[in-house]
Amino acid sequence: MKIIAGIVLACFAVRGYRLTAFPIFTDEAIYIHWAQIAADDPRQLFVPLVDGKQPLFMWLTALVLPLLSDPLIAGRTVSIAASLLALAGIYLIGRDYFSPRHGLVAALVHAFCPYAFFFDRLALVDSLLSALGVWAVYVALGIAGGRRTGLLPFAVLGAVLGLALLTKASALALVPVPVFVFLVHASWKREGFWKGLLTSGAVACLFVLPLFLSGQEIGQTERIPFLHRADYFLSPQTLLTFPWSIWGGNLLSAGEFLLAYLTLPLLAVLFFAAVLVVSELEKELAVMAFWALFPIAAVVAVANGFFSRYFVISIPPLTLLAAVAIARLAEFSTGLLKRFLPRAQEGIVLAGFMLVALSHGFFLPGNWRATP
């Protein structure tokens, strides 16, 4: 517990250090302004719907605003809190479904992963959505593995997915992940499964229903409820033409984002993880791979242009896969080293692999010696 507590503190420290060093981003200003409106007048809780946006992040920011003097710090603090929530879920998934060592490695990788690190310091909705995705998968794995029985876990799953849908429309790309978890574990064969699944769906719908009953009208041209802007998506007519050139461009952009924010060392580790997924065909590895790839594939397939933050929801499973790969590489390398160095310790080798994987990616805005 001391180690995981240290990782949590390190995660908080690197995300909170010089939190305002990065200039305010346009969407941050909009979200914080909506939060201020909601905080001043509770009748305006659904003001983000004016732009077709979901309001959960703004509600949480509105709760934090009275506690901090700087609205920007308040909004970014919500993202940091979400990152710690994601970190806890990542550790639990790694611990419960791989090993305690995997959980610690995954938590440490996520704490310093540039992709998560960068967006967890911004007052954007993506870190919150990522955290909710982590806990949706954790609950689904518990149900599928028989650790949690009855209707209550299904209701909790529905609530988490409902909160995700209250956060951002791209939560729709997370919904198939629990379904895939149940599929690979053949959960439909268990008594009461379909009733539980119906419960999850009903609870999720109840959480989203207020968006459509709020009475708040769209106030911006070319905006639509829930999905924000129709021109962000390829039309059905375009999709039916199989637009290979658009898909190719989207795939290239996605690759550039992943290379820039994950960095080459982590991608190299993930390549080895992909080999493990294909060669070992383990259920949990398959779940992690689907969780990572489906949102990316969905964005590439239907988006008419996108931003790097769209892929934040895929980072937790990628860090879990990286942890598996790092642990396997350390185990294999230790076995080789013991032929020449009988006292070689796996923990030291593991630490070495982690330093190599994270060295190129560890960065902070500005530099440590810069003055505010």
Image (spheres, rainbow, N blue to C red):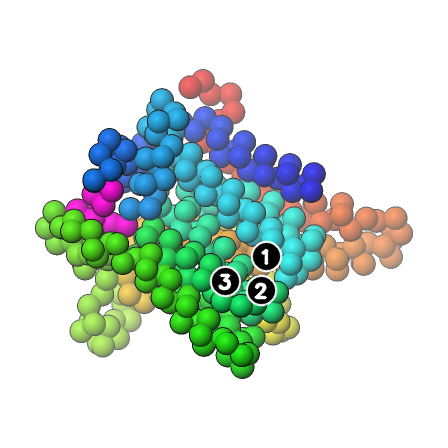
> Percent from the top left, x then y, of residue 215?
16, 51
Contact, mark 1 vs mark 2 (Cβ under 8 Å): no
Mark 1 neighbour density, 10 Å: few (under 14) some (14–19) many (20 or more):
many
Contact, mark 2 vs mark 3 (Cβ under 8 Å): yes
Q: Amino acid at mark 3?
A: Leu
Front position among marks 3 and 1: 3
Does 50 sit above or below residue 147? Answer: above
Q: CA distance from mark 2 to mark 3?
A: 9 Å
Residue lying furthest top in this view?
371
Residue lying furthest right in this view?
342
Q: Is residue 176 magenta?
A: no
Residue holding disc 2 = 148
Mark 2: which secondary structure?
Answer: loop
From the viewer's perspective, tell me whether residue 231 is left or right of residue 354: left
Instruction: Residue 209: give its label.
Output: none
Q: Amino acid at mark 1?
A: Ile
Residue holding disc 3 = 152
From the viewer's perspective, tell me whether residue 252 is left or right of residue 96: left
Q: Is residue 53 magenta?
A: yes
Q: Amino acid at mark 2?
A: Arg
The residue lying at 47 percent from left, 21 percent from top is 370
> Percent from the top left, x then y, of residue 146?
60, 69
Q: Nearer the viewer, residue 75 or 320?
A: 75
> How many numbered tags mark residues here?
3
The residue lying at 52 percent from left, 42 percent from top is 84
Q: Quadrant of the N terminus?
A: top right
Is residue 214 at all visible to an observer of this figure?
yes
Mark 3: which secondary structure?
Answer: helix
Does 32 sit above or below residue 303? Answer: above
Q: Quadrant of the C terminus?
A: top left
> Percent from the top left, x then y, of residue 300?
34, 63
Residue holding disc 1 = 93
